Image: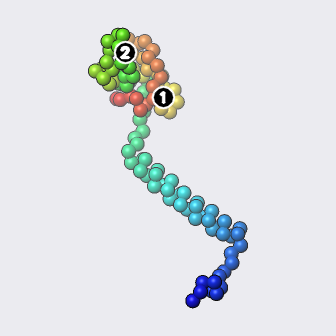
Amino acid sequence: MNTLDEPHAIIPREEQLKLIRNALKVNIEMSHNGNKERYNLRSRPINYTVGQLTYRRNFAQSTAEKKFNAKLAPIFLPAKIKKKGGKVYYELEDLDGKFIGTFHAMDLRP
């Protein structure tokens, strides 16, 4: 049997595009929900309060002239929350009350 002899239903182009758009919507929504579930498995909300003692990530870099090797430096240093700036940013001060800078919650440890 030749495929050219079989009658085919002719669907207008607008309807074909509508079917494709609907299928894309469903696939994108399923993909989004799957990604959301995988991300939320390992994420946890972090909230620090003003005045709370915490540890901040040390971003020191090695320098030959000062004979300092960052690999041997501590990874986290003690700090205190001075002010919350937004959802995930915190202004920090050292234990003596000197302003250190603004850090993301990802770079802090309780």
Q: On residue 44, which mark appears? A: none
| Residue contact at pointers 2 and 1, CB within 8 angstroms | no
Q: Badge 2 is on which residue?
A: 63
* Mark 1 burial class by Cα count in 10 Å: few <14, some 14-19, many 20+: some
Q: Residue 57 in the image: x percent, y percent?
A: 37, 25
Q: How many marks?
A: 2
Q: Position of residue 28 (x, y in %)?
A: 54, 57
Residue at image mark 1: 89
How is the structure coloured here?
Answer: rainbow
Residue most extreme to the bottom: 1
**Kind of residue indicated by mark 2:** Thr
Q: Amino acid at mark 1?
A: Tyr
Q: Residue at x 51, y 26 (%)?
A: 85
**Dot 2 or dot 1, earlier in sequence:** 2
Which secondary structure lies at badge 2? loop
Give the residue drawn at x 50%, y 33%. Answer: 87
Closer to the observer: label 2 or label 1? 2
In this picture, residue 21 sits left or right of residue 99: right
Badge 2: residue crowd in 10 Å (few <14, some 14–19, many ≥20): few
